[in-house]
Image (tube, rainbow, N blue to C red):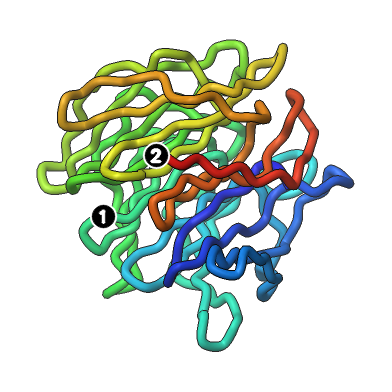
Amino acid sequence: MQELSAAVLHGRIYVAGGIDRANRASAAAFRYDPTANRWERVADLPAPRHHMPLAVVGDTLYAVGGLTGESFVPENTLWLYREDANRWEPRAALPAPRGASAAVATNGRLIVVGGWGLERRLVKATAVYDPGVDGWRDAAPIPTPRDHLAAAALNGLVYAIGGRPLDPDRNYDVVEAYDPATDRWTARAAMPSRRGGLAAAVLDRTVHTVGGESRGGVFANHEAYDPTTDRWSVAPALPLARHGLAAAALGGRLYVIGGGPRAGFAQTDVVDVFVP
């Protein structure tokens, strides 16, 4: 799969949707048990999706928006996964369709940033979902609208990392932090490299970013951000360069899952593990 996302729930890594080896949107969902080193298939999504972020709020896994079909149409769906019943259920729809966005959880809320909406226009609004009332609200707009970005949550802040303004040859190194407590964005230190189509995960209170794409190729870049010092460092590169990949941290390890080993449509089933 490529153009998939990952999230950790109850000690296992979930991935869902993506583009399969027939270059079609997939509804398949899987989870990985690191203790058994085994993948298993779980209930399919209600409909095929790609470029759809996953995030866990509390003890619930959510699948947010995403794109459908060969024309990459954005959707406004919100689904949660019922682990006890192995099924997906709908919740309140996003305020507007969006895909190729990023989603994270902080302070019991789901926060969605970036991506594109109808007519392939970049989405500025930050969408915040409260599971307690099953409702959304718009928050302060992201200063640099972009798609194919990554996001991470740490110390109550949401970091929007990299991405591009619809064009893979205009990748950003931009990092901006959103504070839900003040509803304000601030600029942070730029990434060492400009990348869209990347993934991010938090490991040992450090944000790790991996992979990415331009029209000419894919990146093996692995760069780490320390929010306490607002500094980036270069970490060991991916064994297999790729874009549209998923990343998740679990048990002191960073798992990098799937993605495209060539620019555009390409898929791999490789899972790489980084141990600091």
Mark drawn on residue 150 = none
**83, above or below 258, in the image:** below
Residue 201 located left or right of residue 245: left
Check the image and name the residue furthest to the left. Answer: 182
How many residues crowd around disc 1 within 10 Å: few (fewer than 14), some, or many (20 or more)? some
Residue at x 25%, y 64% (from the top left corner) = 108
As helix, strand or loop, the secondary structure at mark 2 comes to strand
| Residue 152 percent location from the top left of the image | 35, 42
As drawn, the residue found furthest toward the bottom would be: 85
Residue type beneath disc 1? Thr
Q: Is residue 226 visible?
A: yes
Q: Give the left or right position of residue 263, taking residue 139 as reference.
A: right
Q: Look at 55% across and 12% down and name the residue there.
A: 170
Pinpoint residue 173: horizontal percent, then vertical percent: 41, 16
Report the front residue among 179 and 56.
Answer: 56
Sequence-wise, the earlier of marks 2 and 1 is: 1
**Amino acid type indicated by mark 2:** Ala
Residue 43 in the image: above or below residue 71? below
Residue farthest toward the right in the current orientation of the protein: 22
Q: Nearer the viewer, residue 58 or 94?
A: 58
Q: Position of residue 12 (x, y in %)?
A: 50, 66
Residue assigned mark 1: 106
In percent of width and height, residue 67 lies at 64, 47
Quadrant into which the C terminus falls? top left
CA separation in Å, label 2 and label 1: 12 Å
| Residue at 52% over, 16% down | 171
Q: Nearer the viewer, residue 84 or 76?
A: 84
What kind of element bears circle 1?
strand
Q: Where does label 2 land, which residue?
A: 151
Q: Up-down: is 243 above or below 45?
A: above
> Few, some or many C-alpha atoms within 10 Å of disc 2 (few <14, some 14-19, many ≥20)?
many
